[in-house]
Amino acid sequence: MISLSGVAAQFTELALAVLLAPLLTGWVNQCRAWLQNRSAPPLLQPYRVLNKLFQKEVVLAYGASPLFRVAPYLIFGCLCAAAAIVPTLGTDLPLNAAADAIALVGLLALARMFIALAGMDVGTAFGTLGARREMLVGFLAEPALLMVLFTASLISNSTSLATIAATLAHKEFVIHPSLAFAGVAFTMVSLAENARIPVDNPATHLELTMIHEAMVLEYSGRHLAMIEWAASLKLFVYSCIGLVLFFPFGIASGGDWLGLVLALPALLGKLALGGALLALIEMLSAKMRIFRAPEFLGTAFLLAVLAMLVHVLLER
Amino acid sequence: MTLLATPLHQVLALACAWLVLGALGLLRQDSVRWTTRILYPAGAIVGLALAIVALSAIFDPAAALVLPLGLPDLPFHARLDALSAFFLLLLGAVAAGVSVYAGGYFRQAQGTAPGLVCLYFHVFLASMALVMVADDAYFFMVAWETMALSSFFLVTCDHDQAEIRRAGYLYLLIAHIGAIAILLCFGALQAGAGDYTFENMRALQPTAAWATAAFLLALVGFGAKAGIVPLHVWLPEAHPAAPSPVSALLSAVMLKTAIYGLLRVTLDLIGSPLWWWGVVALVLGLVSALGGIVFAAVQTDMKRLLAYSSIENVGLIFAGFGLTLIFHGFGKGALAALALTATLYHCLNHAFYKSLLFLCTGSVLHATRERSLGRLGGLIRRMPWVAWCALIGTIAIAGLPPSNGFVSEWLLLQAFLFTPGLPQGYLNMLVPVAAAAVALTAALSGYVMVKFFGVVFLGQHREARLAEAHEAGIWERAGLAWLAAACIFLGLVPATVIGLLDPITRTLTGHGIGNFARGWLFLAPINAERASYSPILVFAVAALLVAAAWLGVRAFYHGRARRAAAWDCGFPDQNARMQDSAEGFGQPVRHVFEPFFRLEQHAPAPDDARPRFSESAEDRLWYWIYLPVARAVERLTALVTLLQRGRISVYLAYSFATLLALLLFAR
Amino acid sequence: MPAELLLLLASPLAGGLVLALMGHRRRAAEVNAAFSTFTFAAAAALVARVVSEGPFEALYRQLFVDPLNVFLVALTAFVGMTTAMFSRPYMRIEREHGRVTDGGMRLYHSMYQMFSFTMLLVLTTNNLGVMWVAMEAATLTTVLLVALYRTHASLEAAWKYFILCGVGIAQALLGTILVYFAAEKILGAGVGALLWTELDTVKGRLEPAVMSIAFVFLLVGYGTKVGMVPLHNWLPDAHAEGPTPVSAVLSGLLLNVALYALIRFKVITDGALERPFASGLMMGFGLLSVAVAALFLSRQRDIKRMFAYSSIEHMGLITFAFGLGGPVASFAGLLHMTMHSLTKSAIFFAVGHATQKAGTQLMADIRGLIRLSPTVGWGLTLGTVAILGLPPFGVFASEFLILTQAIAHAPWAAPILLVSLGISFAAIFGKVQPMVFGEPSVARLRHRPALLPVFAHLLLVLMFGLYMPPYLAGWYRQAALLIG
Amino acid sequence: MLQHHGPQLVNLLASVMLLLAFAMLSQRRIISLINLFAAQGFTLFLSTALVAWLTGQDHLYASALLTLALKVIALPWILHRLIRRLNVKWDVETLINIPTTMLIGIVLVILAFNLALPISLLAGTVTKATLGIALACVLLSFLMMITRSKAVPQVIGFLAMENGLFFAATGAVYGMPMVIEFGIALDVLVGMLILGIFFFRIRERFDSLDTRHLERLKEL
């Protein structure tokens, strides 16, 4: 039942994700700069950084093991696979049957594990420090994300993302209070996972406060490029998940080419709006001490479980 | 040869083969060559044969047999049905890998003579096989406690160290208490009617009260052997004390015999479980899972870390088992089949990846003579083969996508998602919390395994002499490769494996989920729209993308690289002590889950010449359950000694008083 | 009078007299072993005869052999033989260490044979009066053996043993008199009224009031000899202070013989009274013995004392089994009696050598036996594992039957039994494990220990655990039916 | 006359037995304790002979002669020789004072009587009333053993108990069959010899016969 439009949608989505991810990061940085009323770096700055890094020669530490060299590609591969799964343009993607929401969370967790292991490989103080904090954030955020996805799957009583998107987008409009709780929890989780302000500052140079940056200190050249690209891809994937769960309007239903064509501008608009919103949230909050992060993520986890309870109570 | 006609005969013959191998070990006790070159590989072949026989027997109907041994009016009954065949398959496959590994591992001298260790090893395997085919209470108990006894001797292999003796004693004591509970459970099941064969127990329809008593006793008895929370204290002591191949067998297969026993008693002998039993098992399972993994995170000894992680996995299995009972209690056969499949699949997976990880620690222990995480590190450069197998094991145990751990976790979470349909009010509320706990446990196991792999294999050598650590021998690598391959195979083709589990769920819960799977590629237990997962496709897509990225970068840009000192933000003198130690990596979990532990910190005094900081996280249960019970028995015995104070006139008075009492009252 | 029975009784008697003369010679131990072996041969022949031809009476109906007592005769003779073999090297070592004088050796050998004669007489006699006299004689023969070492403790143990058992046996005499009184009303005066076979046939018509009081006296009397709890105080001292072969024989055989006597009376009393008065009392005392003895175990520091308490516990379990009644429970009781005798004597043999090596009976000073001498170490380990009722061994088979019968017929008793067995497991294993494993702390003895008997016993117990030959099972079942 | 007053005479002798049992219970000096034991033996001999004469049971004569030989002549003689050899001249120490012992004794006698009542109603023998007294003698001597701390009084209590048992035997069943009487007598004699040996060993070990030294074997 793999339709031509499905295959087309799948490839365009993947290409879109890989190519537009740095753009989204650039856009968010621009919005932040404007909000801090300083002059913003050009929109395509991330592409230039990537191109510069790809040119540079890679410098490896003496203790680095083959895992260190393979990790960036593995991380990038996992995140691309995750991006391929999330339905941004159309819902009848060939990969729907291959993986569902739990597999998506699994892939993200796999990416996190590899980056943590890579961080620990060279054996520097900051590498292991970053890895430990990343796993701390990881083991609190991942269950919260899973609970958010469960709430959605309970509503559409299926865990495959396409069916979730279809029920939320194409069925008649119903206000789901559980989704409200899930939405708040999801934003907190995505802030933590993408190393945004309240948990970790992407632009910081103070190693002791870093989480994501501390692990990749030892990378250089093309490996660092892949890691950076993967990080922006991760932000892109998270925003697409947010769109699928909370603003699925505009995603084409199965088989109609016109819907696909119209879905592209809708996606770009929503992403722009999302990016601006993200920058706004970052401006309004300050970075927390690392041991406040568990409480932050604990509340997210609680809200997600509350969402499921609310669903079971009210919407059953 | 009619003797080997039916699979049941073959299984018994193979078990006897193991016993013979064990006895052969006694012939030349002190020759390492005789045991490691000939007996252990032969044991591996027997294990493989057992797996093949079991595989073919899963689809056959149940076959029963009466052996000439045993008590005059209760001879040994043996029976091979789908459930026993599955667990025999698990035993055979894991035993094959571990025996091959043991062939290489036991080259180095253990505390006791190699011949004796070979004897205990093979008696242990044979008794586990017999537990699976036992069909009456006496044969089951004989096989069960022979398993406990032989594993006790294995655990106390090098009994020179005092804590190994203590661990052995604690292990056998709790095993014996468990066996007593199991004996009472069989007594309750038999309820005074007919003999003690399982056939008779199946025919009897026990009243709700007797059935509940039997279930709770079985839960205590088999829970003691499985390592469920209140009775788990022996597990983190016994597994590290045993040599690594034995710890692998203990964790991988012996814990599963307890699960087999519980399934046999609850779903087969009692037959009609009540739904609230499931809630008890679910709660116990989740508490063990969370408690186990939280304690695993703070361990500083790698084998204790894996032992606590075994408690976590057993907890997850108990949660799955609890769900099966809940669904079965409410008459939802299809959902019970799904939950049971998840439980059995997790048993299979845990058997493989836990034994793989224990064998890896065995190789590390052999190479470095060091077990504490604080003195390891950077072994991936010295022992690449062991490191990569450990990486496969780490991904599997953390439940990440391409691995088999993920498939069973996926099935378990799917089963959780169906529960809101249950009529019971509170149950719908309880289950989202349970799903959250399972998700948290899975994430935490990721954390623990990153700590395990990172501290042992990555980073710099924390001890100088780690530099000359040697790679594992041929035999050890063969064992590791076999188990890693099994993990990958189970991860990539779950649909065929579920086809294997189908006859079991059909016999135990009357339903099966095998036929919904759309071909071998996709795993869609209930229906495709609801949830489907195809590991091969996900693995292929990811691999494709990684290859594309790698080739793309090489093509458009270049692949040059050069070596230099680690950057580390410019700090010049970088040494191994600046890495995270095991306590350090466990510190966030100690901080977040502070109430779980009983912390003792030793901070150095300000003027201390050699400041040493140490922190120990102990299990609260020791201070809440075990020490009070020990003190109570102590006081009771002190009371009783008043009877024997040495004065002869007092003794005469006892005799006189007894005489008068009997004369007056016993009319 | 059939030849086997005559030889069975004559051989130990003759042995006793011969050894009284030459007991201190160098070859005395071999002569002692020879007499015991000859007794065992006679016992085996007697067994063959009874199994083929059934029960029979002899010596003007004063002696009587049926499946119940012939099995105990065979057991007594067998363990007597193996103990004699074990005592050969053991006593020679004791003599070299100067703990036993020449006179002591003579006393030991002659009293050993006289002791087995008295036990065999109790088992084979049909006359309850003679049974009492033989039981009293058994006490007399062993009291001097207990005091053989002339140490302070052995003197005290012997004195307590004599006084307590003397008083106990006196009560049993009063019980026997009352039984004779009740029987005389129906069978008329004369020796006939004291014959068990007569009493067994006419037990329905005996006077219930008299029989219940008689059984009380008999229970207190013979119960003291069995070591039931309120009356057990002499047992740990006597079994711990005497030489090890004596402890083995006391623990292994004398307790069984006393319980056999009690069972004979229980059969008659239960016949006389409708309600299970005797069974109920035996169940109560049995349970009390198991529970209290289990609690004593963890306080012990002397290994022979600990295993003496373990004997009290097992005898309590057997009494409970006979108290339960019914063919299966009695079968289990008889099986447990055999298993306990074989295993406990094997343990005492191993303990004997272990204490000789260490020169002390305190468990804290004996370490690393397996490392020092594997035979002694493994003998003690396997013996302890067997006595604790771990399955591959026969003790588990009988305990399994007793416990399952208890669950079926007296469910309230099962948890108490199981908890006590659990506590005793924890205590005994906790103390024996450090003795056997770990670094050796004792000197190595010059000549090799003769531990053939230990492994012979344990092999038999292992065989019973896995496979019970049908004719043996049939034999036990016949005996169980007799007990009813 | 003897024929007619026989039963009263038997009861008289039984009450003398009880009186002697109480006397032994309250006796302080060891020598007189042995003499009282001998007197009790003699009373037993008289009673057995009388019953033999009254009922014409000739085997009872043999039993009476056996009692005379053993319990009136042999044992007291052995005890006196032992006392002289051990030069034991002190008086008897008791664990609880005499008055309370007597009180307990009275309670025991009452208990023995109504215990033996149902049995004596059934007894066909002329001496059925004495069964209660015999049981009382046994219990009193048991009490004496408990309350005495010295070894010799304990043994005398044990022998007094044997007397009580023999008296019960004649009372209930006109004595046990002869072979058993001889067996019991032999046991008592051998028992006395062994106890003698023990006296010497305890004396040489502790140079005192107080059982309070024999208290080392206990559980801590």
Image: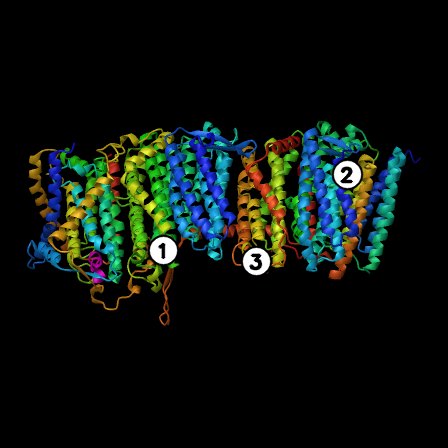
Q: Mark 3: few, some, or many residues within 10 Å (few <14, many ≥20)?
A: some
Tell me the CA gap for discs 2 and 3. Answer: 45 Å
Q: Quadrant of the C terminus of chain C?
A: top right
Label 3: chain letter: C
Answer with mark 2 or mark 3, whichever residue precedes in sequence: 2
Label 2: chain letter: C
Residues in magenta, as a range = A207-218
In the image: residue A126, left or right of residue A232: right
The answer to the question of whether label 3 and label 1 lie on touching residues, with beta carbons closer than 8 A, is no
In magenta stretch: residue A208: yes
Label 1: chain letter: B
Disc 3 marks a residue whose amino acid type is: Ala
Disc 2 marks a residue whose amino acid type is: Val
Q: Point out the frontmost of discs 3 and 1.
A: 1
* SS class, disc 1: helix
Counting from the top left corner in percent of width and height, residue B453 is at 31, 54
Where residue C130 is drawn, which disc sits there? 2
In the image: residue D76, left or right of residue B67: right
Frontmost residue, C210 versus C449: C449
* SS class, disc 2: helix
Tell me the CA gap for discs 1 and 2. Answer: 74 Å
Q: Quadrant of residue A7?
A: top left
- Above/below status of B309 relative to A288: above
Tag 1 residue: B364
Tag 3 residue: C364
